[in-house]
Image (tube, rainbow, N blue to C red):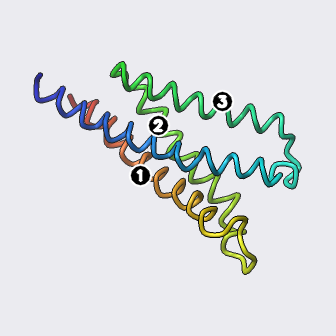
Amino acid sequence: MTGNNVKRISWDKSVVTLSLLLFLFALPHTLEDFATGEPAKAGVPVFVLAYVIAGIFALQGLGLFWLGRQLRRGFVIHIFLGLFWPIAAGAAQLPTILSENPYRSGFISVFFVGGMIVIGVLLFLMSILALRADRSQ
């Protein structure tokens, strides 16, 4: 294995690890959204939102597949996802979390949102660095 391949695998592992961690925060949070009826409260049809979220999770799986095939477009998908999840979670949830009212199930609900934001930002940054490193090889 050459030095460039070792570096590529190291970047891939970092992005894959962060992507899988993002699943561990985004999936329970999304299930909690549907369980508490948040889409209906916001006036969004559950059917539409369910397919949009399923599409985003499928896109994340496709990005992981492409990373496994060592294709650069896997990094591009993860750059998008690394931006999407923190912005979506932050815009939709942070105003409620920062209000004086208790937020859903308490700490665990806040933990899911915080995890999505932190892991998403890290995924975004790591994917950009990985794409740049891959381009220079």
Observer-nearest of 95 and 113: 113
Is tag 1's residue or tag 3's residue first in the polypeptide sequence?
A: 3
Residue shown at 67% from the left, 32% from the top: 54
Q: Position of residue 76 (x, y in %)?
A: 45, 32
Q: Position of residue 119 (x, y in %)?
A: 46, 52
Q: Position of residue 29 (x, y in %)?
A: 64, 51
Q: Position of residue 132 (x, y in %)?
A: 30, 37
Left or right of 134, for residue 116: right
Q: Quadrant of residue 44?
A: top right
Label 1 – label 2 distance at C-alpha: 10 Å
Name the residue type under label 3.
Gly
Query: In the image, which disc is placed on residue 55?
Result: 3
Query: In the image, which disc is placed on residue 64?
Result: none
Name the residue type under label 2.
His
Q: Is residue 19 above or below residue 119?
A: above
Label 3 – label 2 distance at C-alpha: 14 Å
- Label 3: how many Cα within 10 Å (few below 14, some 14–19, many 20+): few
Q: Is residue 95 above or below residue 9?
A: below
Label 1 – label 3 distance at C-alpha: 22 Å
Label 3 sits on a secondary structure element that is helix
Q: Which residue is mark 1?
A: 122
Query: In the image, which disc is placed on residue 78?
Result: 2
Label 2 sits on a secondary structure element that is helix
Name the residue type under label 1.
Leu
Label 1 sits on a secondary structure element that is helix
Question: Quadrant of the image for the N terminus?
Answer: top left
